[in-house]
Amino acid sequence: MFTQSKKDLAEIRDFLITETDFCEYKPNWFISISYLQDYSRDQLLKYHKRLNDVIQDTFDPYEMNVICKGYFIEKGKKKLIEKRDLKVLNTISDVYEYDKEMTLKNGSYGTHLVLTLYPSILDKPNKKIRKLWSTMYWDFGGKPPSYLLEEENQELLLAETLEFVIRDRCPSFIANGDDAIQIDRIDDRMVFKDTGEKGWKGALHYCTKQIFCKDQFLEVFDEKNSNICVA
């Protein structure tokens, strides 16, 4: 028998899959972002707006293409850390030493962005994309290498462009390291991570795994910066 929380989650997932813009414009990218510091949820909403501005300004400055965005906030697992701010007297050596005390620290927030952005947007790259490529591929004469311009490699070119522009224009809050931004293409033929569901439906299952009741949905989902209607 399903618990109420499982019923609520099933309804939320069904709504996202059948009633939002993702139903018509199937998302093809899943982007996970780690942050430089342990920011609050309100701060993350501001950074989501910045990410929106960067993506829109780069790939669709004239608002002629479909770009659907769904932001989901995930709370990281609690970690056991060593706290060393307590000095105690060592009765054997008769000196004060730092006491090694273990404590649980709340996990940091991270973002999952489920995105609809078609590679065909690169068929006729706008001047901002061309300018971006001149920096990305300066050692290739300011243009992507020829193999990336082939049709079968357009998704790779788009992924590289996405990652570069986010890192380049959001350095104040994106974490350092190769894993700070992970961009995965969503393949509707393959099960998404460990959800048991394929493609973009599996991606939405993954993003909602921390939801246990309907009231919690708007804690996880950033309605302010996502442009898929959930009303």
Image (cartoon, rainbow, N blue to C red):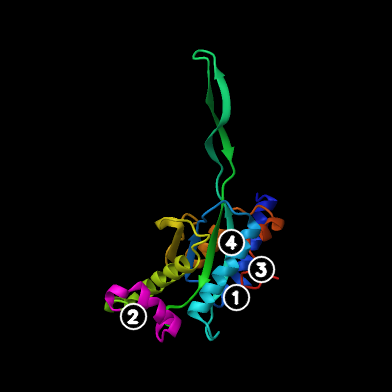
Q: Which residues are magenta?
A: 121-141
If you read the primary sequence from the N terminus, does the residue marked by circle 2 or circle 3 appear first?
2
Read off the residue under disc 3.
224
Read off the residue under disc 4.
72
**The one of 13 and 27 positioned closer to us in this rendering:** 27
Q: Main secondary structure of the magenta part?
A: helix
Q: Is residue 126 magenta?
A: yes
Q: Which mark is residue 21?
A: 1
If you read the primary sequence from the N terminus, does the residue marked by circle 3 or circle 4 appear first?
4
For the residues bearing labels 1 and 3, Cβ distance under 8 angstroms: no
Q: Position of residue 206 (x, y in %)?
A: 53, 58
The amino acid on which the numbered mark 4 sits, given as a three-letter code, is Phe
In this rendering, is residue 142 above or below 39? Answer: below
Q: CA distance from mark 4 to mark 2?
A: 31 Å
Tell me the quarter of the picture where residue 176 sits: bottom left
Q: CA distance from mark 2 to mark 3?
A: 35 Å
Q: Residue at x 58, y 37 (%)?
A: 104
